[in-house]
Structure formats: structure tokens, C-alpha cells
Image (cartoon, rainbow, N blue to C red):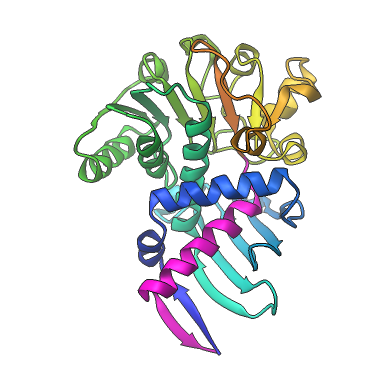
Amino acid sequence: MYIRWLSGIDVEKALPVSEAVAAVKDAYISATRGDVLQPMRMKLDVEREDGVHLLMPSHQSSLGRSAVKIVSVFPGNVRRNKPVISGIVALFDGETGAPLAVMDASVFTAIRTGAASGAATAALARPDARVLAVIGAGAQAPYQALTVGSVRPIERIHLYNRTPSRAEDMARWLQERRPDIDVSVFARVDQAVAEADVICTATSAQEPVLFGEHLKPGVHVNAVGSFRPNMRELDREVLRRASRLFVEIKDAAWEESGEVADAFEAGILGADDLVEIGAVLAGDAPGRRDADEITVFKSTGIAAQDLHAAARLFDRAEKEDIGTRLAV
């Protein structure tokens, strides 16, 4: 028996942005319709290092695949000059349970998280959105910019990071891949987002980095960085100005999103104010209702994203012989 090993370079080659967005759209629709088996994310906190190990299993019979992602998120690795996110994704035959592939989870997670924002932006942002602001310059941030730039006619990208040199590095990385887009680094968040039509937050912040007072009418926000109750990227005013909050799965949002829990306790959000993005993509719920509406998508990540993205990645890798076949 053989399995296929896919390095980070292989993952990027086998999962182009367009395929990743399509996979995540399918995942969201499947999750909303209850077609995916995906227990709540299991986690092991490593308090001494302020890190966490996450286990995300999933299965979909109609897709014929199962997947398990084991990923570590250790923010302190920035000081060690090591990746904050690392781990593996294992893909299995959904009928026999046989392993098919193992792949690097760092690049994979960055791409599929970018695709989450891409799918939400395609569904919720104004069609004429031309200015994108990205807050954060970690591993996931560049793919936020690339993916949003693939679903809207983005002409300018504004970057902010609390360490300016990292934002400068990201700007150079983006300019190499999208020389047609003007990329600028800003010294303050309010300057970066003032003209933005789409904003992506991709940080590990425990206190808000984006404030409602700085948002212009009609902006769309993708908040993808926080995934634990003690983390918050958005202040209450962001959610107060948004009439609804779009999420992946309601139960996961209530349990894992610090922004959602805080807004609920403050009386800003009620149970009926959460809308699953899969329902919008499937045409079962309305998305943006007018040009001036502020729309917010809050992602904590769900296993269905990994399952659908890994399945598409594997199919392309098999077809084009990407990666390394290993005897087991």
C-alpha cells in the first residue's frame, strides 16, 4: 500500500487559490446541510508555552473521504523565529478507512483559511470592492490578500502589523505575486482601514485590533485569527454596526469565538443574529442587503474545510503526480 506525502511546496502547487475557494464553498454548504460528520474541535492547552494542540476529524460519505488535522498553534514561536502554526493533515478513503495522503498543515491551513475569507467575500462584499486592508502579517495573512484579490477587483492592498518589518516583508511577497496591485504598509490601523472596502484580520490578538468607529459604510470584514474564547480581534462596536454576523457553524461560533461570547453577554448579539455562511452560499439565506450595509464574517475554522480542501488537493496531486509516494 502507498500513501502520498505532500510538503508545503507540494500543497501550494496542488491547491491553487481558485480550487481552495471552491472547496471551502462546498464545505460550508455541506456543513450547513448536515452532510458532514465533524465533532467539535478537540484541544489540548499547553499553558506554559501559551500554545494549543488542535484535533479536527471529519467524514462525508457523499464525498467518499475522511480527514484528520492535527495542528499546533504556538504564538510564542515568533520569538524563536519558528512557525506559529505547524502540524499534519491525514486524508483517508471514506469507504475503507485506508490512508491516502499526509500533508503539511502549515501551508495547507493558511491556504484554506484564505479560502474561507475568499468564499465569504465572494458572497458578502460589494461587487465593486477595490481596496483591501489586512491586519496581521503572520503565515495566514498573505493568503488572505491573495484569495480576496482573486474574487474581487482589488487594486490596492493596505497592510498593518504591530511589527512593521514583517508587514514590509509581506508587502514584498505580495508584490512578487500580484505586481498589478499596489501594496502599502501603514503605521496605524485606522489609516490602513479608512478607505477599505474589505478588511481581513489575521492575528492572534487577545484584545481588539479593529474598531467599529473606523469602518466606512459598506465595508465587509473577515475576522479569521481568533479561535478561542479568550481571543478577540473585533471590538463590540464592529458587531454593533453590523446588523447580522455571518459564521461557519452557529454552535462552534458560540463556543469558540471570543467576539461572539462577549457580544452576547453585552446584549449586542442574540441567537437570531447569527447566519451560517453556507446558507447564504446555498441561496437559503440573504447575504448583503444594500450597498451601505456593514457585513462581518467570523471564522474559527471547521473540520469540513480541511476535508474538502484536502480531497481536492489529493485528486490534483494524484492526477499530476505531485508529492512523493511512500510505501507503508
- Give coordinates of residue 18: x percent, y percent: 40, 48
Q: Image height check: is 252 above or below 294?
A: below
State left or right for residue 267 relative to residue 73: right
- Give coordinates of residue 248: x percent, y percent: 65, 39
Q: Image height check: is 197 above or below 149?
A: above
Residue 192 is drawn in which quadrant?
A: top left
- Give coordinates of residue 158: x percent, y percent: 33, 26
Q: Image height check: is 287 above or below 65?
A: above
- The answer, for residue 265, to whether it is visible in the render is yes
The magenta segment is 300-328
State left or right for residue 159 relative to residue 70: left
Q: Residue at x 61, y 30 (%)?
A: 232
Q: Image height check: is 138 above or below 96?
A: above
- The answer, for residue 77, to whether it is visible in the render is no
Name the one closer to the observer, 254 or 235. 254
The verdict on residue 320 being magenta is: yes
- Give coordinates of residue 52: x percent, y percent: 64, 53
The quadrant of the image that shows the C terminus is: bottom right
Q: Residue at x 20, y 35 (%)?
A: 180
The quadrant of the image that shows the N terminus is: bottom right
Query: How many badges with numbers are in the image?
Result: 0
The verdict on residue 249 being magenta is: no
Q: Residue at x 39, y 63 (%)?
A: 14
The residue sitting at the front extreme is 283
Name the one closer to the observer, 185 or 222. 222
Q: Main secondary structure of the magenta part?
A: helix
Residue 147 is drawn in which quadrant?
A: top left
